[in-house]
Amino acid sequence: MDATSVTTEASRSRNGVVDTRGLLCPYPFIQAKLALESSPPGTTVEILTDSEATATSSIPILAERNGYTFTVTERGGVWRLLVTKP
């Protein structure tokens, strides 16, 4: 992961993690979109969400439309998406 911090209004850390747990739709999607748009090519952004709709629909659609690769895993009601910007 790129050491550059991802600038969003969501909770975040310096290693490219966007933590949107506790946010209601559409805010997890908006924060993920802003983080990906502001990241340089080749960056992988980790998105944490407890919104099933965000994890299984919104962000995958965003990724597919923009040519990003992604993986989604779920554990204990929290989805972890790793999205890589080409």
Image: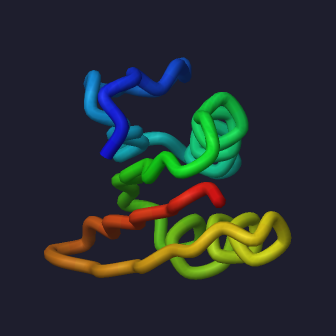
Residue 32 in picture, x, y percent from top left: 59, 45
Q: Image check: 61 left or right of 47?
A: right
**Residue 15, quarter of picture:** top left
State the residue at coordinates (17%, 77%). Answer: 75
In-image side of 35 versus 75 (left or right) = right
Task: Name the foreground residue: 85 vs 24.
Answer: 85
Is residue 77 or residue 38 the one in the foreground? 38
Give the number of marks. 0
Residue at the limit of the structure toward the left, as seen here: 76
Residue ID at (66%, 67%): 68
Is the residue 56 above or below the residue 20 in the image? below
Which quadrant of the rendered structure holds the C terminus?
A: bottom right
Q: Relative to residue 82, is residue 14 depicted above or below? A: above
Q: Depth check: 21 or 69 in front? A: 69
Residue 78 falls in which quadrant of the image? bottom left
Position of residue 36 relative to residue 13, above or below, is below
> Is 51 placed above or below 23 here?
below
Most foreground residue, 50 or 80 = 80
Residue at 57% over, 74% down = 69
**Image location of residue 5, percent across then percent down:** 39, 22
**Where does the image place residue 49, in percent across and percent down from the top left?**
39, 56
> How is the protein colored in the picture?
rainbow
Residue drawn at point x = 31 percent, y = 46 percent? 1
Q: Is residue 6 left or right of residue 31?
A: left
Percent x, y of residue 38: 66, 29
